[in-house]
Amino acid sequence: MASSNFIDYVKICCKSGAGGAGSIHFRHEKFVDMGGPDGGNGGRGGHIILRGNSQLWTLLHLKYRKHVIAPSGQKGEGGRRTGASGEDIILEVPLGTVARDAETDEFMVEISEHGQEVILIPGGRGGLGNDHFKTPTNQAPRTAQPGEPSIEQWVILELKLLADVGLVGFPNAGKSTLLSKVSAAKPEIADYPFTTLTPNLGVVSYRDDKSFVMADIPGIIEGASEGRGLGLRFLRHIERNSILLFLVPSDSKDIKADYNVLLNELKEFNPELLDKKRILGISKTDLLDEELQSLIEKELPNVPFVMFSSYTGNGLMQLKDLIWRTLNE
Ligand SMILES: Nc1nc2c(ncn2[C@@H]2O[C@H](COP(=O)(O)OP(=O)(O)OP(=O)(O)O)[C@@H](O)[C@H]2O)c(=O)[nH]1
Ligand SMILES: [Mg+2]
């Protein structure tokens, strides 16, 4: 099943390479007396680096990679030769990946662009060789630095989808159907709640070759912030969306009340979500005649709204227009 491949959370143990030790060495050559110190520096240990890759959509490829270990730098050598650096290990991750320290939960880095490289765990610096410690009063230093030690750390990588519009609605509101109508995405659709178990993304093409990305996430129910239903595991995916499209079906008994329940769950999860621009889509208008539709309009919450039906296609263009305008405001 495709959904089980959607991995948006992995915990891995990372260990960077230690720096190589500096060398203590003196030049020995046949006709050179007291050749002096020539111990080279140790090489740098390998970094662990995250690199953004726009072709990746999940962290699945890292799921079974529990330990990531970069090699150490080599020791310095005589003749002022610097030891070889340990090779860096590059982990490719999808855009929207955030790394946190698994123990302290502290933010470490975030990857948002293709090709962006950030050092997650730095390799140790190599130690200086004795050549470096030569002074006018000490021509034959017997000191060199050890390399810096490696760093071992448990890291959580978490994926937050980078969509422009996030769909917010109760189960069965018609979120997946909408996504399937306006994009090439093929989410599962059914008349039972929680059909969607993992987020789906779709690219919506708009007039004149423009496009935006829409994310369909599993339905939210009252009490989701306390763990009911699928809970809020997926809500973090809409933390990144620049606008939120609330969907309430037109046959709802009280659209305004439904909207407020959804709003409240978002607030409980993360109050900053309420700073995002919100629009309201009233779905399944094919279930209502026009007279009822105009009655409903009088009792809506105070946000820009569009009425539409994914079945008939009515209102879909207006909905895209509203999304586009709101995105570009
Ligand atoms: N009459 C009518 N039914 C619709 C419309 N859009 C969706 N439905 C139906 O509503 C039901 C739920 O649709 P989904 O798209 O799966 O709903 P969802 O919001 O993704 O639901 P979850 O994934 O469970 O959260 C399905 O039986 C759809 O066929 C519409 O425009 N008109
Ligand atoms: Mg769905």
Image (cartoon, helix red, strand yellow):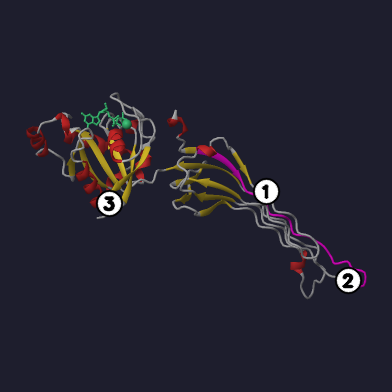
Q: Is residue 76 left or right of residue 193?
A: right
Q: Check disc 1 and report its element: helix, strand or loop.
A: loop
Indicate which label's residue lies in the foreground, 1 or 2: 1
Quarter of the image that includes the N terminus: top left
Give residue 282's quadrant in the image. top left
How far separated are the C-alphas under marks 1 and 2? 36 Å
Residue 265 visible here: no
What residue is disc 2 on? 34
* Tag of residue 327: 3
Q: Earlier in the sequence, mark 3 or mark 2?
A: 2
Residue 34 visible here: yes
Q: Earlier in the sequence, mark 1 or mark 2?
A: 2
Type of the residue with mark 1: Pro
Q: Residue 21 placed where, x, y %?
A: 73, 56
Give residue 260's quadrant in the image. top left
Q: Residue 177 placed where, x, y %?
A: 28, 33
Q: Are marks 3 and 1 in contact (CB under 8 Å)?
A: no
Quarter of the image that includes the C terminus: bottom left
How far separated are the C-alphas under marks 3 and 2? 74 Å
For this rendering, which residue is in front, 53 or 276?
53
Q: Check disc 2 and report its element: helix, strand or loop.
A: loop
What residue is disc 1 on? 71
Indicate which label's residue lies in the foreground, 3 or 1: 3
319 lies above or below 131: above
Q: Check disc 3 and report its element: helix, strand or loop.
A: helix
Q: Is residue 104 left or right of residue 122?
A: left
Based on the picture, tell me whether residue 238 belongs to the magenta stretch.
Answer: no
Q: Residue 319 placed where, x, y %?
A: 22, 44
Give residue 139's quadrant in the image. bottom right
Magenta residues, as a range? Answer: 10-34
Type of the residue with mark 3: Leu
